[in-house]
Amino acid sequence: MNTLRNKMIYQVFVRNYSQEGTFNALSKDLKRIKDLGTDILYLMPIHPIGELNRKGSMGSPYAIKDYYGISEDLGTLDDFKSLIKQAHELDLKVMIDIVFHHTAPDHVWVKEYPQFYVYKQGKLANKVGDWSDIADFEFDHNPELISKLTDVLLYWSKLGVDGYRFDVASMIPKAFYEYAFPRVKKLNPNTITLAESIDSNFVDYLRYHNHTCLSDAELYQYFDILYDYDNQVNFIGYLRHEKTFNDFIEAHRRQERIYPVDYVKARNVENHDNPRIHAYTQDKVKTINWLAYTFMSKGIAFLHFGVETLSDHMDYLFEKDPVDFSKIDDQIVYWIKTLSKLKKRRIFAQNYGYKLVSHPVDILHFEYENEEERLISICNISHAKGMIFIDLPEGEYRDLISNELIDVRFGQLKLSDYPMIISIKK
């Protein structure tokens, strides 16, 4: 059993969550976020942003100049503490983004600890690429860097932070995790760790060039949850009509074979690095089916703020670009709330009795089974029509979401445009 699979993460970029773009404005909306079914509120980086070589007018939150500071536009440290307190009162965990692979080139450590950084021809540099607004850490033979970064985690944990999402976690060496995580877990054994593992193409590139690149299997030695990026090339490829549906499904099945039995993937269809799912579907019902996928596939559901507005606009990372929450779609909200409630069932947490079923059409058919029930979920992400074969006795079944009857005759059922979820009690 892994009860993280019963939960939902809601990702927020505070600057663009509201017109105000502050912790206090976000605090006012915590009840709405909780009511969606959220268990973990994940905040993208909250620290001061570097000014040297800044991208855009406001800069990337991933170019940090002080790990102990709060970006002034978001509010004060007291505002952040208040946000944590109010979130905890609603039984919401608070996770913050940790960017330990690099800093802004004007980070306070550049002068204090120049030995922490990568240099080329005497200048601050990157190991990979040439990103102008960041400078990479040099972890090799640098135990002091690992110790200092660990102190950062301990500082925020003592303030009440419940978890950490690690940016490009694959590029941080094992030595850091082996030193830092036991110390953080000693302070708070319930600390939740989420790794932004990287996509397969980037893995190939990094290893070809002899750079640190931990596999997902290695990251599971340290992290509770990993991004679903080992399947990202197939997922985005399918949406762009560059990969087959079978490519996507087989990559999903492969995860069951190669990862620890209690592995947890953050199932998502959009985030701050990728376009909105509605930008691909341009169809509300298809979007609903993809959202159902994030809940019905084995893992923790991960939603990006604003998905409930049915927006197809990917907010700008380097500018002020708030989501318009006046456009919340009630039907999308209904599905999120209903699916998140359904996700709490014990059957989703178990380590056995899970499979994907293939069909001649592009539908996501998940099945779970234990000694109490068999649960079937069919997400019609392609608007396929007609009948499909299904391994069910002839009869009528009640859909858990719509409460409508689903008729099975001669081992077949008629597809619905909307997700279909059936529970058969034993």
Image (tube, grey):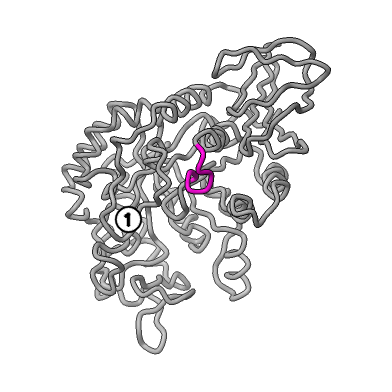
| Residue in the picture at 62% in, 32% down | 379
- Mark yes or no: residue 82 visible: yes
Q: Quadrant of the N terminus?
A: top right
Q: Quadrant of the C terminus?
A: top right
Q: In this view, does 376 lie above or below 287?
A: above
| Residue in the picture at 32% in, 42% down | 161
Q: Is residue 103 above or below residue 349?
A: below
Q: Number of marks in the image?
A: 1
Most frequent secondary structure within the magenta stretch: helix
Residue bearing mark 1: 151
x and y, in percent, of residue 371 in the image: 70, 16
Q: In this view, does 287 lie above or below 334?
A: below
x and y, in percent, of residue 302 in the image: 47, 40
Q: Which of 288 and 6 is in front in this view?
A: 288
The amino acid pointed to by label 1 is Asp
Q: Give the range drawn in magenta.
A: 277-283
Quadrant position of residue 392: top right
| Residue in the picture at 42% in, 36% down | 190
From this viewpoint, which residue is outermost toward the bottom? 121
For label 1, count other residues whose C-alpha is less than 10 Å away and answer few (under 14), some (14-19) or many (20+). some
For label 1, the SS is helix
- The answer to whether residue 316 is magenta is no
Q: Which of 134 and 155 is in front in this view?
A: 134
